[in-house]
């Protein structure tokens, strides 16, 4: 049987219905062998329990075998489904219901699907593994239909990675009503990082490339400076320009630098995927 589904017995009822419901919702399905609607409902509940992968526990109670429990919880007909939280029934329904309606009832008592991604990302950020946190927060941002607070959190990751343009693009999307303290902090960090990234050496190289865009050596040097400054997008774009003109520039040094930057971004990073496609087109 699935780890997200359990048969309730006299021995485990206290642990399953009371103790377990203190840490997550327990969906209790009261059924019996003679109940035809029960046979329609149970597969739907089992499917949802596996799909939600532990966000709730499905507890199946044979009402004929465990009549005292059914009576204690006021079950009058079968099937009856109750949602238990903190040892108490908080919601439920009687009779077989369509999957869409069951989902709506569950959603009221379950964390948003992206909350798990955010929790994982927060743990990685606490360990300063921002490259690994990035794809998780990106997924959460997309799954949540671009919730502002998740967008600000994602911008903060980009700021840690010195990917300032991507951070700024996210912060620009935040409407005035959502511009809270975390947003203000991120904007302040963005401003400071913009100022810090403009070293005299970097400015001199940027001016040199602007004055002569065909100077591949200057573009390569600037790309290396950008990569050392964690400005991955700027570095990759410059290196793409160099490689388009000469795929074997500087005995392959530009190509190696390009691939090293992509590798440093980590798996699941959309920036890495974007430039992998570009170099693949160029190579093949």
Image (spheres, helix red, strand yellow):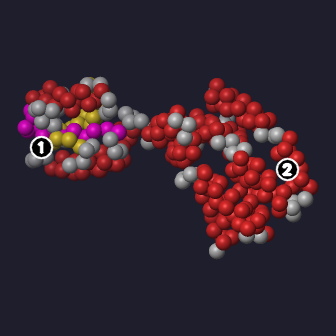
Q: How far across and down, in percent of the image, does residue 81 sit?
A: 24, 37
Residue 206: assigned label? 2
Residue plotted at (25% across, 40% down): 58
Q: How far across and down, in percent of the image, does residue 223 sit?
A: 76, 54
Q: Is residue 119 left or right of residue 252?
A: left
Residue plotted at (52% across, 35% down): 127
Q: For the C terminus, give its image quadrant.
A: bottom right
Nearest the viewer among 237 and 96 is: 237
Q: How far across and down, in percent of the image, does residue 186 sit?
A: 67, 32
- Residue 19 visible (yes or no): yes
Residue plotted at (16% across, 31% down): 13
Q: Which residue is mark 1?
A: 32
191 magenta-colored: no
Residue at the bottom extreme? 284
Q: What's the magenta region?
A: 55-67
N-terminal of the pair, mark 2 or mark 1, is: 1
Nearest the viewer among 61 and 23 is: 23
Within 10 Å of disc 1 (Cα), the crowding (few <14, some 14-19, many 20+) is: some
The answer to whether the residue labelled 2 contacts the one labelled 1, judged by CB atoms less than 8 Å apart, is no
Q: Is residue 56 left or right of residue 189?
A: left
Q: In terms of secondary structure, where does tag 2 sit?
A: helix
Would you identify the image quadrant in which residue 251 lies?
bottom right
Q: How many marks?
A: 2
Residue at the front extreme? 251
Residue 189: assigned label? none
Residue at the left extreme? 65
């Amino acid at each position: 049987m699935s780890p997200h589904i359990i048969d309730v017995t006299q021995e485990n009822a206290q642990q399953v219905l009371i103790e377990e419901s203190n840490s997550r919702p327990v969906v209790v399905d009261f059924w019996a062998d003679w109940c035809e609607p029960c046979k329609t409902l149970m597969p739907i509940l089992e499917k949802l329990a596996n799909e939600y992968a532990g966000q709730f526990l499905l507890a199946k109670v044979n009402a004929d075998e465990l009549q005292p429990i059914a009576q204690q919880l006021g079950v009058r007909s079968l099937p009856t489904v109750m949602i238990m939280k903190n040892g108490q029934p908080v919601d439920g329904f009687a009779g077989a219901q369509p999957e869409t309606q069951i989902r709506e009832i569950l959603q009221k008592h379950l964390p948003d699907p992206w909350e798990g991604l955010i929790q994982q990302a927060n743990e990685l950020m606490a360990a300063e593994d921002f490259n690994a946190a990035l794809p998780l927060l990106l997924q959460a941002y997309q799954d949540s239909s671009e919730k502002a607070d998740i967008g600000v959190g994602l911008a903060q990751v980009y700021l840690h990675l010195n990917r300032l343009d991507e951070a700024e693009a996210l912060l620009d999307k935040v409407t005035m009503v959502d511009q809270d303290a975390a947003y203000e902090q991120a904007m302040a960090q963005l401003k400071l990082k913009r100022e810090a990234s403009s070293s005299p050496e970097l400015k001199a190289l940027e001016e040199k490339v602007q004055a002569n865009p065909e100077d591949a050596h200057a573009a390569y040097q600037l790309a290396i400076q950008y990569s050392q400054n964690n400005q991955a997008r700027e570095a990759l774009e410059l290196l793409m320009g160099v490689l388009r003109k000469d795929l074997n520039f500087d005995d392959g040094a530009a190509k190696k630098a390009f691939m090293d930057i992509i590798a440093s971004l980590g798996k699941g990073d959309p920036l890495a995927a974007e430039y992998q496609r570009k170099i693949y087109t160029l190579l093949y």
